[in-house]
Amino acid sequence: MLRGSQIGPRGSTSGRDAVRINLAGPILLAAALVAAGCGGKGNADNGEAAGKDEEKGPAPVPVEVATLERGPIEQLLRFSTHLEAERAVEVRSEAARKVVELLAEEGHRVPRGQPLVRLEDEQQKVALTRARGREEQARREYERKDNLFAQKMVSEQELTQARYELEQAELALADARRELSYTIVRAPIAGTVTARHVRVGDTVAVGQHLFDLVDFDTLVALIYVPEKDLPAVGVGQEARLAPPAAPEQRFSGTIDRVAPVVDPKSGTVKVTVAVPFESGLRPGMFLEVELVTAVDPDALLVPKRALVPDGTQLAVWRLGADGTVERIWIEPLLEDREKVAVGAGLAPGDRVVVAGQAGLKPGAKVELVGIAGEPG
């Protein structure tokens, strides 16, 4: 029962305030209980989910694997170089004259000595005619003096002078013939005209560059072999060549020469590979050259994609039957472009990871998303 003193007189606010306070207490308490009940359930749910995640562990790493097999492999040394012609010349003028006729064009294959260009020759022809006349006159005079000397009608000094004049006339005639020959520029070697640098009407100077001539039968590739690999290289050894722009085109060459000295600056030895002329090969082409230095006809082969460097060592990740991986250290014995031959540690039929190695740890679970060499 409420006493009148607790209610207070009409118009007083103290009683209403007391009622509000007394009602607010139970309401706040109920709200707190509800909140506590809800919060407890939420925490329980979160804890249960976390427990399930911990039971599952890290998500499997998606990887691609390859199955190891035995097969043949060749140890290769690889080099990049340009193809060049061992016999290539710049044809130059030996006379200062005007060009009157072109006798060869770019792409023409010419034998040694074939005329390539003709220069003005009128003055040289006139000079030759005069020199020939002087030589004939000097010869007749010498023969006359020689007969007279035999008859003791001239002195030995006169005969000697006649002989000297004949020799000088012969030299002048040879000079005139040589000057006339310079008006015909000839191919110094057999080959193909690869460039023409002169036109009809041009006045050329002595030594001016007129043509480029290349013998395509003397193509070579120069490579520089490190000193440590020199024991595996010898004259007559086969070399394989391929232009990177068309790797499906393969050509063969033969080591023709091995330099007898090592370059002290680079530590390499110059090796000349003779390359037979074939359709598609041109001087100046960029080539990749391979030398076979060792062969194993039955090696355990590991794709290079599987190799994971770790400092100075190499490893692969091998997939186990339980879906986890283990790291296997390997030592390559031979290698080619795509594979390496290995010894102990692996066996035919083992599956090694070739894609997705990043972040793998021993015992990590993986998800197989592909097998190299098999259609997806």
Image (tube, rainbow, N blue to C red):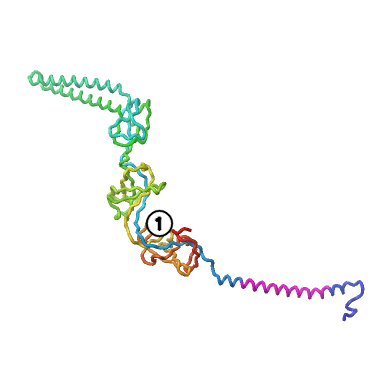
Q: Residues within 10 Å of mark 1 (few under 14, many from 20)?
A: few
Q: Position of residue 311 (x, y in %)?
A: 42, 62
Most foreground residue, 364 or 226: 364
Rendered view: 274 above or below 27: above
Rendered view: 159 above or below 212: above
Q: Position of residue 110 (x, y in %)?
A: 31, 34
Most foreground residue, 298 or 195: 298
Q: Pick the quarter of the image with the N terminus.
A: bottom right
Most foreground residue, 329 or 45: 45
**From this viewpoint, which residue is outermost toward the top?**
153
For the image, the number of numbered tags is: 1
Tell me the element at label 1.
loop
Q: Position of residue 66 (x, y in %)?
A: 43, 61
The quarter of the displayed image where residue 340 is located: bottom left
Magenta stretch, main secondary structure, is helix
Tag 1 residue = 338
**From this viewpoint, which residue is outermost toward the right?**
10
Rendered view: 286 above or below 203: below
Task: Verify whether residue 190 appears in magenta.
Answer: no
Residue at x 88% of width, y 80% of height: 2
Answer left or right for 180 relative to 140. Answer: right
Q: Amino acid at mark 1?
A: Glu
Q: Which stretch appears magenta?
A: 20-48
